[in-house]
Image (cartoon, rainbow, N blue to C red):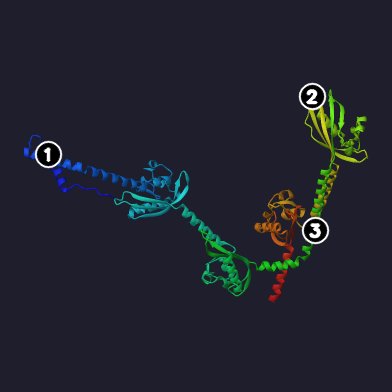
């Protein structure tokens, strides 16, 4: 910045002397100056005026530069990302910048002379007051983190630094919004707690395979007491076959993930079967920064799978037989559906028209299809006006008469289905549709109708009803609970055995989520999802919750049923109560244990 010139010392002295002389003249107007003194004074004043005129422009430039700098500093102050406040000891706000006012959600003028402490939440206000008091008493910088209230938004966290002025009457306070940092800290804390409290063993390793973190479940699974015994070791040293473990680690680093089973080696030398899931942890730019592995002990599961497979060979056979019966029932239903479709396509019908005069029918015209439907020709109807009425099945005549009465009374007419006696003596079902024709004056002048032979449709419906009743009886006859599940995982049907085992009625169960009735909903959900994916499953063990709170161990076998295109429409799932078997297994195990101990 260009520096302005300063007044020479001699000029200031002349000006001062001139002022003193003028004061003296004003104070003692009766004391006349000598002529020489007056001329000298006038010369000095004229010289000073000339000097002022010469430097006036420089003074103006310097003043403009100072004003620009002050304006720049004001903008820097007002629009700083940090809120600045000047506070008294009682936290009364003396001044603030625009950022500070925006933080508190008020105009700057509205904040002046209000207490800053009122914007601090109650749970952090005590800490804030102590910090400010300590600063004023010790003339030291105050540091604290508080929660500030803004009437236009949710509370936010702030870091506050306050420095007391030299006279000790006020403090200059800087407020920085640290809400995002607090949220990140909270998220990291939650993630850390989640890792430490996870039931699965979890470990992190650097890109070379050396462990940098393990959770408590990892130490428990491998039998170590402290992370000091684990951290820094290579990941392959915890497995029975280090070469196989190295291959898994290589696959994880090359492909980005690994899923498989390995045999773990505990601290005491014993082994266990583990399911391993390993993958890269990447930063925001997508670059890998470490490896993460999750481990589940599946030793007991693998033993149980083999025992269950041997103990349930007979159950599997029964399930296959039941599945075959259900498949046959589905096939019959499909065939009935096809028959019904063919019947609809081949159904015959005919139209008729009835003329009305003075409220009475005077003529009826029948379409050519009447012979195929009723066995009578148009000429036969023409020669015998009562023929149609005599053909109506006796028990259905009231319904037909009621339909006609509505036509003549001007009411809305619905289709009716009734029986007629065919000319060959057989009973046929028809659908009778009537459309009245009303004149502009509102009188019935005629009505048209269509007669449709629905005999085959009715027979097909009866077959479907019988088939459904048969299939339903097969399902209800099963002593095992049977459930059908839709693609969305909701129950579509159950048998009586299911109602008994679940403790809920069929009405309560249908439409609810299948997985909600098990102690492990995710495991139950995986069972039917696997069936949709693979077509069938065998011997999946689940823990079923009864309505009264009791738990039953069951084995689930399930198969999918498909539509005409082979797409799975739903799942049939049959359960077997293995509570008694589990009890016998425990007794056998206890007997074996006792025998070995002796």
User: In the rendered structure, are the residues bearing label 1 and label 2 in contact, judged by CB atoms less than 8 Å apart?
Assistant: no
Say the numbered circle drawn on residue 42: 1
Query: In the image, residue 309 lies at what x, y percent?
Result: 74, 66
**For residue 165, which numbered disc appears in the image?**
none
Is residue 244 shown above or below 199? Answer: below
Residue 384: in sight, yes or no?
Answer: no
Q: Which mark is residue 324?
A: 3
* 452 or 232, nearer to the observer: 452
Residue 576, position as x, y percentages in the image: 75, 60
> Percent position (x, y) of residue 258?
60, 65
Disc nearest the viewer among 1 and 2? 1
Q: Nearer the viewer, mark 3 or mark 1?
A: 1
Q: Which of disc 1 and disc 3 is earlier in sequence?
A: 1
- Contact (CB < 8 A) between labels 3 and 1? no
- Quadrant in which residue 263 is drawn: bottom right
Identify which residue is drawn at 67% across, 54% down.
516
Whether residue 283 appears in this view of the structure is: yes
Spatial distance from mark 1 to mark 2, Cα to Cα? 127 Å
Camera-nearest residue between 513 and 235: 235
Q: Is residue 17 above or below residue 562?
A: above
Residue furthest bottom in the image = 598
Of 108 and 535, the residue lying toward us? 535
Which residue is identified by label 2? 443
Query: Helix or strand or loop: what does disc 3 sit on?
Result: helix
């Amino acid at each position: 910045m260009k520096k302005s010139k300063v007044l020479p010392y001699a000029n200031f002295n002349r000006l001062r002397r001139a002022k003193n002389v003028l004061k003296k003249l004003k104070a003692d107007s009766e004391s006349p100056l000598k002529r020489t003194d007056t001329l000298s004074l006038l010369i000095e004043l004229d010289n000073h005026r000339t000097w002022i005129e010469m430097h006036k422009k420089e003074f103006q430039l310097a003043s403009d530069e100072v004003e620009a700098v002050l304006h720049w500093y004001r903008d820097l102050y007002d629009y700083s990302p940090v809120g600045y406040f000047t506070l008294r000891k009682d936290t009364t706000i003396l001044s603030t910048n625009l950022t500070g006012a925006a933080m508190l959600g008020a105009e700057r003028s509205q904040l002046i002379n209000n207490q800053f402490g009122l914007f601090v939440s109650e749970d952090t206000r005590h800490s804030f007051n102590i910090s400010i008091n300590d600063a004023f008493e010790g003339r030291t910088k105050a540091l604290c983190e508080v929660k500030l209230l803004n009437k236009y938004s949710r509370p936010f966290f702030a870091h506050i630094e306050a420095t007391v002025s030299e006279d000790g009457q006020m403090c200059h306070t800087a407020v920085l919004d640290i809400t995002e940092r607090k949220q990140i800290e909270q998220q990291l804390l939650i993630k850390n707690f989640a890792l430490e409290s996870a039931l699965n063993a979890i470990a992190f390793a650097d890109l070379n395979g050396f462990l940098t973190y393990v959770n408590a479940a990892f130490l428990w699974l491998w039998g170590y007491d402290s992370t000091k015994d684990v951290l820094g070791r290579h990941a392959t040293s915890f497995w029975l076959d280090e070469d196989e473990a190295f291959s898994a680690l290589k696959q994880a680093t090359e492909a980005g993930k690994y899923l498989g089973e390995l045999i773990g080696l505990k601290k005491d030398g014993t082994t266990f079967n583990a399911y391993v899931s390993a993958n890269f942890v990447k930063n925001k730019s997508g670059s890998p920064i470490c490896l993460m592995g999750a481990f589940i002990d599946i030793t007991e599961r693998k033993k149980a799978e083999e025992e269950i497979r041997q103990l349930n060979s007979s159950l599997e056979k029964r399930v296959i037989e039941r599945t075959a019966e259900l498949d046959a029932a589905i096939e019959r239903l499909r065939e009935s559906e096809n028959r019904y479709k063919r019947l609809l396509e081949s159904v015959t019908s005919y139209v008729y028209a009835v003329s009305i005069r003075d409220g009475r029918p005077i003529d009826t015209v029948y379409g050519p299809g009447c012979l195929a439907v009723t066995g009578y020709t148009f000429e036969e109807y023409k020669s015998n006006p009562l023929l149609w009425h005599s053909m109506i099945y006796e028990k259905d005549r009231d319904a037909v008469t009621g339909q006609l009465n509505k036509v003549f009374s001007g009411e809305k007419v619905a289709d009716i289905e009734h029986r007629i006696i065919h000319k060959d003596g057989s009973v046929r079902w028809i659908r009778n549709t009537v459309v009245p024709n009303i004149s502009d004056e509102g009188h019935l002048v005629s009505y048209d109708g269509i007669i449709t032979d629905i005999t085959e449709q009715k027979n097909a419906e009866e077959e479907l009803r019988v088939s459904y009743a048969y299939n339903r009886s097969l399902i209800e006859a099963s002593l095992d609970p049977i459930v059908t599940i839709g693609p969305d995982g909701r129950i579509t049907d159950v048998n009586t055995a299911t109602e008994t085992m679940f403790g809920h009625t069929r009405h309560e169960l249908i439409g609810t989520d299948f997985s909600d009735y098990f102690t492990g909903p995710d495991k139950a959900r995986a069972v039917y999802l696997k069936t949709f994916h693979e077509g069938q499953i065998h011997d999946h063990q689940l823990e079923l919750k009864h309505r009264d709170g009791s738990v039953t161990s069951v084995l689930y076998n399930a198969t999918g049923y498909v539509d005409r295109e082979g797409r799975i429409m739903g799942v049939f799932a049959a359960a077997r109560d293995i509570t008694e078997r589990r009890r016998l297994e425990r007794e056998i195990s206890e007997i074996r244990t006792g025998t070995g101990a002796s």
